[in-house]
């Protein structure tokens, strides 16, 4: 029979070993894209249910600044944003070359090509003009003007300390990160694993463009990668690898999480993305995915670390510039 002190030593070593070899936490980021289309009550209601069901999960909201450029709807838009934001959330910039932003930036609107193919630019556009046009069709000067105007508009709306941004269509211009870094941004959530996109959109040009862009990021030779890193060392790309709720099924998303755990890719971020414009349809799926992650984490003794993209909490308009946000709030209050 072993001495008691030996058993105690073995037990102590066992606890120490278990603690030393505990699996690192898995970082999960839930993001919501406010793309710029007219806000519908059922979609805003769905986001409200998300916040009430999972009050402890922070959300990063990527906001298209056009919500603040439409004078007729700006107050109601601001009220909708305020309704679903919590103090632990982050606000980032969502960049899409819609007509109101293009006009604000002083550049010429382009209507083709779109993510879905070419259109006749002679045709009259009535709603959401430019939303489905990739930013990459604009030249360098115009792209920088668009980013500057978008950044300025969010700042004027009171959202300061902006650290993250995303470009619609997952197709950011390579030189955009240089200006983003100069303005204080540190994270780019534009890149996406093509697997999340191609299964549902393979017949459209966007599928090819996303795949080509991903190849540039993941298959470039070391010299090219070093050059890219040196060109914008302060901006970290965060590829979307978890799931896009509008395009991916619940079982697909959870299967990707299982592979991530199995392959021990704790250095990656498991992103879950949803658009406001389809939140009514996507919310039930997101709910089941979040519950599924919790169940898996419990069974596998894994810690889930929910966080915003940059970790900042800037979802409340600050005193940096309250001119627009105060006016919007006053207008919304007057309409009640």
Image (spheres, rainbow, N blue to C red):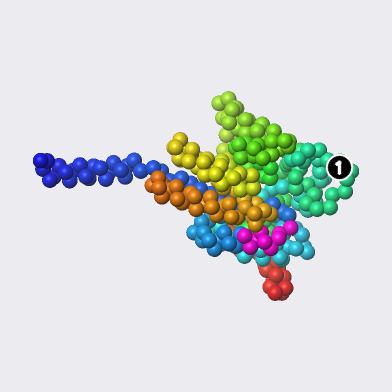
Vertical comparison of 206 with 55: above or below: above
Which residue is drawn at the image coordinates 27% and 45% (left, top)?
15
The verdict on residue 263 being magenta is no
Residue 20: % across, % down: 32, 42
Badge 1 element: loop
Residue 87: % across, % down: 54, 62
Which residue is drawn at the image coordinates 69% and 36% (left, top)?
202
Segment colored magenta: 38-46
Local crowd size for mark 1, using a 10 Å CA cut-off: few (<14), some (14–19), many (≥20):
few
The verdict on residue 45 being magenta is yes
**Prevailing secondary structure of the magenta residues:** helix
Please tell me in which quadrant of the rendered image residue 318 appears: bottom right
**For this view, does 282 lie left or right of residue 107?**
left
Image quadrant in which the N terminus is located: top left
Residue 105, visible in the rendered structure: no
How many numbered marks have been drawn onto this rendered protein structure? 1
Which residue is drawn at the image coordinates 41% and 50% (left, top)?
298
Residue 193: % across, % down: 60, 37
Residue 168, visible in the rendered structure: yes
Vertical comparison of 17 with 58: above or below: above
Q: Residue furthest right?
A: 122
Which residue is drawn at the image coordinates 76% and 43% (left, top)?
133
Please tell me in which quadrant of the rendered image residue 132 appears: top right
Residue 198: % across, % down: 65, 37
Residue position marked by numbered label 1 in the rendering? 121
Nearest the eye: 221 or 246? 246
Nearest the eye: 131 or 247? 247
């Amino acid at each position: 029979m072993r001495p008691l002190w030996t058993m105690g030593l073995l037990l102590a070593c066992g606890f120490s070993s278990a603690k030393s070899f505990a699996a690192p936490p898995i970082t999960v980021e839930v993001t919501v894209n406010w793309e710029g289309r007219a806000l519908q009550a059922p979609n805003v209601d769905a986001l409200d249910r998300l916040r009430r069901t999972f009050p402890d999960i922070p959300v990063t909201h990527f906001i298209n600044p056009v919500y603040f450029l439409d004078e007729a709807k700006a107050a109601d838009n601001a009220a909708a944003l305020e309704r679903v934001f919590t103090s632990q959330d982050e606000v980032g910039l969502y960049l899409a070359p819609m007509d109101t932003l293009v006009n604000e930036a002083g550049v010429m609107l382009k209507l083709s090509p779109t993510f879905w193919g070419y259109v006749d630019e002679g045709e009259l556009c009535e709603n959401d003009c430019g939303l489905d046009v990739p930013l990459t069709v604009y030249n360098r000067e115009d792209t920088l003007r668009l980013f500057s105007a978008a950044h300025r508009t969010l700042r004027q709306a009171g959202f300061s300390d902006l650290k993250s941004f995303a470009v619609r269509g997952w197709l950011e211009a390579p030189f955009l990160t240089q200006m983003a870094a100069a303005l204080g941004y540190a994270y780019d959530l534009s890149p996406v694993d093509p697997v999340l996109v191609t299964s549902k959109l393979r017949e459209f040009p966007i599928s090819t463009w996303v795949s080509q862009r991903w190849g540039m990021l993941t298959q470039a030779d070391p010299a090219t990668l070093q050059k890219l890193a040196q060109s914008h060392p302060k901006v970290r790309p965060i590829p979307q690898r978890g799931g896009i709720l509008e395009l991916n099924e619940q079982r697909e998303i959870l299967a990707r999480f299982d592979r991530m755990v199995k392959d021990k890719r704790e250095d990656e971020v498991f992103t879950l993305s949803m658009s406001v414009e389809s939140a009514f349809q996507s919310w039930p799926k997101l709910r089941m995915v979040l519950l599924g992650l919790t169940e898996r984490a419990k069974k596998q003794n894994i810690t889930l670390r929910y966080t915003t993209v940059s970790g900042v909490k800037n979802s409340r308009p600050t005193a940096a510039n309250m001119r627009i946000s105060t006016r919007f709030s006053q207008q919304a209050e007057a309409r009640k």
